[in-house]
Amino acid sequence: MPDKHTGEPRPPRAPLESDWKPDYGDRKNLSRVLQPPPGEGPVLEWRNASHGERIFYAAFMALAGAGIYTWKSSGFSWVGQWYLWLILIAITVLSYLLPKNDRMSAGADWFNHKGAFVKTYELASVKITRAFVHASLDLVDREGSKTSTNLPDIQQNRELWDLVYNGILHSVHNGAETNSQALEQLRLRSRIR
C-alpha cells in the first residue's frame, strides 16, 4: 500500500478494458473535487464529468426523447404540441446538469464516488454487474459503506484507477467476496495466486 499521505510509491499499473481512452474530465475546477472524510489521507487523483460529456449526454437524451415522441405519434405530429416541447427541454436541461455531480476521487487507501466513500484496502465485496451497456463496479467495505461506478468511467483516469485497483487486489487477496465477472473482467484470478 502506498503511504497514506504522499501516495508513494505509486502502485503498479492496473489492467484496462481493451477500448480504454484517457479522459481526465474537468481538472480545472479544484473546488469541485470530492474530499475525504476527516482523518483520511489527501486526495491523490480525481475525475469530474467534463463539459463535453455533459453536452453529449444532454444531446443523447434530447434525441432519444424526440425519437420516442416520433415513434409514439407514428410521425411528427407531436412537433405542434407545445407541452411536449417543454417536457423535452426540461429533460435536456436536467440531462446536462445531473452529470455535473458525477465526480470521483481517490487517496492511497480510499475511493469516493458521488460522496459515497469506501476504504479500498478493507473491502468486503468486489463485484461487477451489468448496468445497461457498461459494467458496473460495486464496492462494499467492512464497515458496510458502498459505492458503485461504471468501470469505463473510473478507468479513464489511469492513475486514479491504479490506486483503486491496488486496494481491490489487496482486499480480494485477503478474502473479499467477489463474483466471476469481477474475477474475469478485472483479471484478478492470475494476480491473487
Image (cartoon, grey):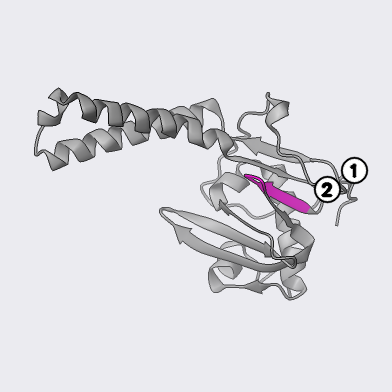
Up/down of 28 relative to 168, above or below: above
Q: Residue furthest front?
A: 83
Q: Quadrant of residue 121?
A: bottom right
Judge from the rendering whether residue 181 lies leftward or rightward of residue 37; answer left or right.
left
Number of marks in the rendered image: 2
Up/down of 14 relative to 90, above or below: below
- Give the residue type at disc 2: Arg
Q: Is residue 25 magenta?
A: no
Judge from the rendering whether residue 66 lies leftward or rightward of residue 17; answer left or right.
left
Q: Which residue is mark 1?
A: 6
Which quarter of the rendering shows the N terminus?
bottom right
Residue 188 percent across, percent down from the top left: 66, 67
Q: Residue at x 57, y 39 (%)?
A: 102
Q: Which mark is residue 133?
A: none
Up/down of 58 relative to 116, above or below: above
Tell me the crowding category of disc 2: few under 14, some 14 to 19, or many 20 or more residues within 10 angstroms, Cα based: some
Nearer-the-camera pick, 55 or 116: 116
Q: Residue at x 57, y 68 (%)?
A: 184
Q: Which mark is residue 10?
A: 2
Nearer-the-camera pick, 187 or 68: 68
Where disc 1 sits, the SS reads: loop
Which quarter of the rendering shows the C terminus?
bottom right
Residue 150 percent across, percent down from the top left: 54, 51
Q: Which residues are magenta?
A: 110-115
Nearer-the-camera pick, 186 or 146: 146
Kindly tell me whether residue 156 is visible in this rendering.
yes
Between marks 2 and 1 in the image, the one whose residue lies nearer the viewer: 1
Judge from the rendering whether residue 6 lies leftward or rightward of residue 166; answer left or right.
right
